[in-house]
Amino acid sequence: MKKYADQKRRQWEFHIGDLVLVKLQPYRQHSVTLRKNQKLSLRYFGPFPVIERIGLVAYKLLLPPTTKIHSVFHVSQLKACKGDHTQPYIPLPFTDVEVQPIIQPTKILQERVILQGQQQIHQKLVQWQGLDDDQATWENTTLLQQAFPDFNLEDKVNLKGGGIVTMQERAKETIVN
């Protein structure tokens, strides 16, 4: 059994100066990138040169100074970069060491209530600072208040028409016609 399992395994080893790509999983690490569909975002960023080998399975990479993420990665999160190295690197997202987003919410676009089992969950569609409207994300209201306690949800609501008054006017129009 071990013989067949070992056939699929290989020893990963990079040398100092090798260019590698860094694997990030934004659908599991929600703070890495904020997109509508996390599964469609980039999985590998780079290439970045290897600076140092730490132990048997970790490597330190030379990351740009604008990125604020930890520069030591497990060998399973690295992939050898092959091909043309003259293309500019794909920048890493801006996050701090604790992998918390630096961006702030700017306004609430919509609200909704979803059911998870028998429980009602209140969610808000949040427009993030520096991102387009199509990159707004649905966030649980309680988690949003915990993550951003200074953000006033009531002041940032974007009200767009509709309501009881317009419904009554439509009802009158149908009766008249």
Image (cartoon, rainbow, N blue to C red):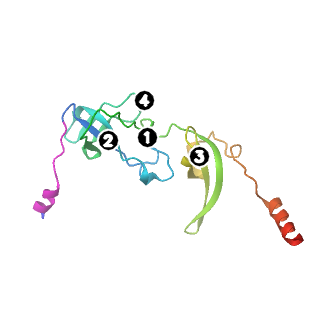
Image point (59%, 46%), residue name: 133
Magenta region includes residue 3: yes
Q: Position of residue 154 (x, y in %)?
A: 70, 46
C-alpha gap between disc 3 and disc 4: 25 Å
C-alpha gap between disc 3 and disc 2: 28 Å
Q: Amino acid at mark 3?
A: Asp
Closer to us: 114 or 42? 42
Q: Which residue is mark 4?
A: 66
Tell me the number on the disc at residue 144: none
Magenta region includes residue 174: no
Q: Which residue is mark 1?
A: 99
Q: Position of residue 109 (x, y in %)?
A: 65, 49
Neighbour class for label 2 at 10 Å: few (<14), some, many (≥20)? Answer: many
- In the picture, measured across the screen, residue 12 lies left or right of residue 156, that is left
Read off the magenta span.
Answer: 2-14
| Marks 1, 3: nearer the viewer | 3
Image point (41%, 52%), residue name: 28
C-alpha gap between disc 2 and disc 1: 15 Å
